[in-house]
Image: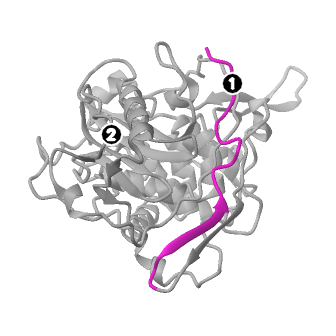
Amino acid sequence: MKKTAKSSLLVTSATLLTLSLTATAIAGGPAVADGTPTPSQKASPKASTSPTATPPADMSTVGGAQLGKAGTQVNLGTGAPVLPKDLSARSWIVADAESGDVLAAHNAHWRLAPASTLKMLFADTLLPKFGKDEKHKVVPSDLAGIGPGSSMVGIKEDETYTVHDLWLGVFLRSGNDAVRVLSAMNGGVEPTVEDMNAHAEELQALDTHVVSPDGYDEVGQVSSAYDLTLIARSGLQKKDFREYASTVRAKFPGETKKNKKGKTTRKSFEIQNTNRLLTGDYGLDVYRGIAGVKNGNTSNAGSTFTGVAERDGKVLLVTIMNPEKEESNEVYKETARLLDWGFQAADKVEPVGELVPPKGADTGTQPGTEASGEAGGSGDGSPVAASAQEAGSGGVGVALGITGGVLVLLAGGVFLVNRRWPLPDLVRRRPRP
C-alpha cells in the first residue's frame, strides 16, 4: 500500500513515578475502567446487547478495504514475526501512531460497546472548551442521572473544583461524576452527546454512536477498535490530553469540614490511574514505554483498552475490545503482546490500511500554520494542564511539549510534521518491581 494523505500524531509521554500498587478505594460499576467487574455490573438495567454475536460480513472500509473484512488481517513480509497465537479479543488493531499505518487488525470495524474508552472522545471534544484553572461549584443537578454502580472519583455537592481537578478525575479514576460535572459546564448531557457525535463524524470515526458521555452501557452506544484508535490519535495531539492520560497518581480535593476548633479545612486524597500498564498490578509489570491512554469495563462491553507506547523511536497505538479469556488483567496482557509484536514487525509488514485524517483537514488549516489541537489543547491560550508534580504526585512530573513540532497542511491535503520526535525522555525511567 502506498503511503498517501496520512496525518501525523504529535505525541509525547512522561517521566513518571514508582508508585504503590494499592489504589484508593473507589466504587466500581458498569463504567468502571480498571478491568475488574463489580456485582452491580451484572444487572445494569440499561445495558444493551451486542449488535451481533459474530462480526458482520460487510463492515466499514474507512481506512482501506482490507479493514472491512472479518477476521485477522495482516500482510507479513520477509522476516516478520507471526502474530501472537493466544489473542482472544473480539476486535483489535495495531497502528503506527505517527504514520497512521495499520500494521494488523482483527474485526477492526466491528461496532461494539466501548465502555469507558469512550471517555477519550469526551475529552477530545471538551478539553479545548475550558481553561484548566476555571472553577465550578457543583450543584445537585450536575450529578443527576449517573448510572447505578458507576465508577466515581468522589465529587461532592456544594464543593468547588477546578477544571484541572475534574479532568484528573476523568482520566485517572474514570469518574462518571467528573464527566457529568464537565457536561453540565458544557450545557448538559444532551448537548455534550451531540457535540461528541459531531466530533466523531468530523474525525471519520463513523462506527461510533454516543448515547451517554461517560461510556455507561446504553442501547445503541457503539464504537470500534478502529474508531477508538482514531480518537486516541486525535486526543494525543493535545498536550493536556497527553499529560492526563500518562499521569499515574495525583491529589484530588476532598470534602470541606470543620475541625474541633470550628476552623474550616479541606484536605486532599490520593487518586491513582486505573490503567494497569501504567501502574502495574499483581502478575503484571508496568509496560516499558507506555504513555496512556484509556481503559474501561462494563457488563456489555467486557474489558476495553486503548494504549500508546514508544520504543526505539517508534510509537504504536493498540486497541483491544472484549477478550473472551477471563483471566485477570487479560485486556492488558493481550495489549502488551500486540505492542511487542508491533515493535518487532513495524518495518517488516505491508500495512493493511491507515488511520484517516479528519474530514475538515484539507480545508481547516492553512499552509505553514500550527494545527489547532497542538497549541495547547486548552482553547483559551492558557498554559497546558499542570504537571503530575503540581497535581500532587510528589515526583519529577510529566515531560510535556513537542520540540519544534508543527503540523502543517500542504496543497492537496498531505500532512507533514517538522519536528524532532520522540523526545529523548519519552520512555520513563523507574526501578523494576
Residue 119 vs 431, above or below: the answer is below
Q: Amino acid at mark 1?
A: Arg
Q: Is residue 427 magenta?
A: yes
Label 2: few (<14), some (14–19) or many (≥20) C-alpha neighbours in 10 Å: some
Residue bearing the label numbered 2 = 80
Q: Is residue 206 magenta?
A: no
Q: Residue at x 46, y 13 (%)?
A: 283
Q: Give the alpha-carbon distance from disc 2 to disc 1, as whole Å.
A: 31 Å
Q: Which contiguous range is marked in magenta?
A: 412-433
Residue bearing the label numbered 1 = 430
**Main SS, magenta residues:** loop
Q: Amino acid at mark 2?
A: Ala
Say which quarter of the image contains residue 278: top right
Residue 173 vs 346, above or below: the answer is above
Tell me where residue 212 appears, x and y as whole percent.
38, 52
Label 1: few (<14), some (14–19) or many (≥20) C-alpha neighbours in 10 Å: few
Q: Residue at x 27, y 27 (%)?
A: 42
Q: Residue at x 45, y 39 (%)?
A: 343
Going from N to C along the chain, the mark reached first, 2 or 1, is 2
Taking 259 as reference, is 428 left or right? left
